[in-house]
């Protein structure tokens, strides 16, 4: 696909095309899991409900698997070259969401209960672990000579993802303002690791499996990491002002639990009376009720 063709097709068409390409291999991979893990994976991927009933149209957008396919095509390879990498990053993404929901205590995602809420914390942790292992084995078994390098690239991204998640959790222990406060540039670094690592890895894996030179693979990885910072910023905005019907999460969900997000940190860094009122509101060190969350959103805005 050329750049001009991609522009004409539009993002929704590209995402649909890539999902259709990757879906059979993803279904086949999940089918190799223990039946219990396959059930929880199908639930997490939005394929089925807790009773095993099909749930058409409830899966995610598939951005990461699309980046893998586009990375292969950008490197001059075929879309099919990227499929093992696309499956691997989709499994890792799902694993990371499962564990992230547990750590954050989120009870809903995509307008459905999160896995830990539906099945319990223990089964959810195991499901994430199973997807992690399946992702690595899928990539290790990819045809061609690029598989070892691809596995190493995935391992690096996983290390960065976990590093970013640790930073995000530690941010919750730090004050909103004053000595030790989380600064906007620290938050951007966290987002580069937590969100950008897998986006960069997706594009890089597609290129690597298509036989691209190392410089091309690294360039696509870096580009994806920059995209990840933008992704995280948008996610933070939606966590405060997003429509619950679109986000699948309660309104003001991040503010309610005093999660440090980029819009709030940026607002607190401003020399403005609203920033000082926002600091006083958030520094109460207890979850915000509906009224306080609305007020915090207004002050942030």
Image (cartoon, helix red, strand yellow):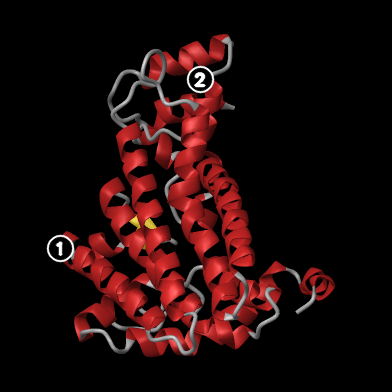
> Is 133 displayed left or right of 26 in the figure?
left
Q: Please tell me which residue lies in front, 36 or 3.
A: 3
The N terminus is located in which quarter?
A: bottom right
Tell me, yes or no, whether the two marked residues, 2 and 1, touch with CB atoms within 8 Å: no
Under tag 1, what secondary structure? helix
Q: Which residue is mark 1?
A: 122
Q: Give percent across and percent down for residue 201.
A: 50, 63
45, above or below 271, in the image? below
Q: Return the disc, 2 or 1, that comes first in the chain's sequence.
A: 1
Residue 43: name its quadrant. Answer: bottom left
Numbered label attached to residue 268: 2
Instruction: Give the residue at x 47% y 82%.
Output: 84
Q: Give percent across and percent down for residue 273.
A: 55, 9
Instruction: Give the residue at x 59% y 11%.
Output: 272
Instruction: Give the residue at x 42% y 47%.
Output: 250
Measured Cα–Cα span from mark 2 to mark 1 = 38 Å
Instruction: Give the residue at x 79% y 76%.
Output: 2
The C terminus is located in which quarter?
A: top right
Badge 2: residue crowd in 10 Å (few <14, some 14–19, many ≥20): many
215, above or below 285, in the image? below
Q: Is residue 49 visible?
A: no
Q: Give percent across and percent down for residue 82.
A: 55, 80
């Amino acid at each position: 696909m050329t750049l001009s063709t991609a522009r004409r097709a539009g993002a929704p068409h590209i995402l649909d095309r890539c999902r259709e390409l990757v879906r059979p291999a993803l279904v086949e991979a999940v089918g190799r899991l223990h039946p219990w893990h396959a059930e929880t994976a199908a639930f997490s991927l939005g394929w089925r409900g807790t009773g095993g009933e099909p749930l058409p149209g409830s899966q995610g957008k598939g951005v990461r698997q699309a980046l893998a396919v586009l990375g292969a095509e950008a490197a001059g390879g075929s879309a099919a070259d990227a499929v093992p990498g696309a499956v691997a990053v989709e499994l890792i993404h799902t694993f990371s969401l499962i564990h992230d929901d547990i750590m954050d205590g989120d009870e809903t995602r995509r307008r459905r209960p999160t896995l830990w809420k539906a099945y319990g914390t223990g089964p959810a942790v195991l499901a994430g672990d199973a997807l992690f292992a399946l992702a690595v084995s899928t990539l290790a078994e990819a045809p061609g000579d690029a598989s070892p390098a691809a596995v190493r690239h995935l391992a690096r991204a996983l290390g960065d993802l976990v590093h970013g998640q640790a930073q995000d959790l530690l941010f919750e222990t730090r004050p909103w303002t004053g000595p030790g406060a989380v600064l906007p540039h620290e938050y951007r670094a966290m987002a580069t690791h937590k969100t950008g690592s897998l986006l960069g890895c997706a594009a890089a894996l597609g290129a690597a499996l298509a036989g691209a030179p190392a410089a091309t693979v690294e360039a696509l990885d870096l580009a994806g990491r920059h995209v990840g910072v933008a992704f995280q910023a948008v996610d933070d905005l939606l966590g405060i002002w997003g429509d619950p019907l679109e986000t699948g999460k309660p309104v003001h969900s991040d503010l309610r639990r005093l999660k440090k997000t980029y819009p709030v940190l940026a607002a607190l860094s401003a020399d403005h009376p609203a920033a000082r009122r926002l600091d006083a509101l958030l520094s109460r060190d207890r979850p915000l009720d509906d009224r306080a969350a609305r007020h915090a959103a207004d002050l942030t805005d």
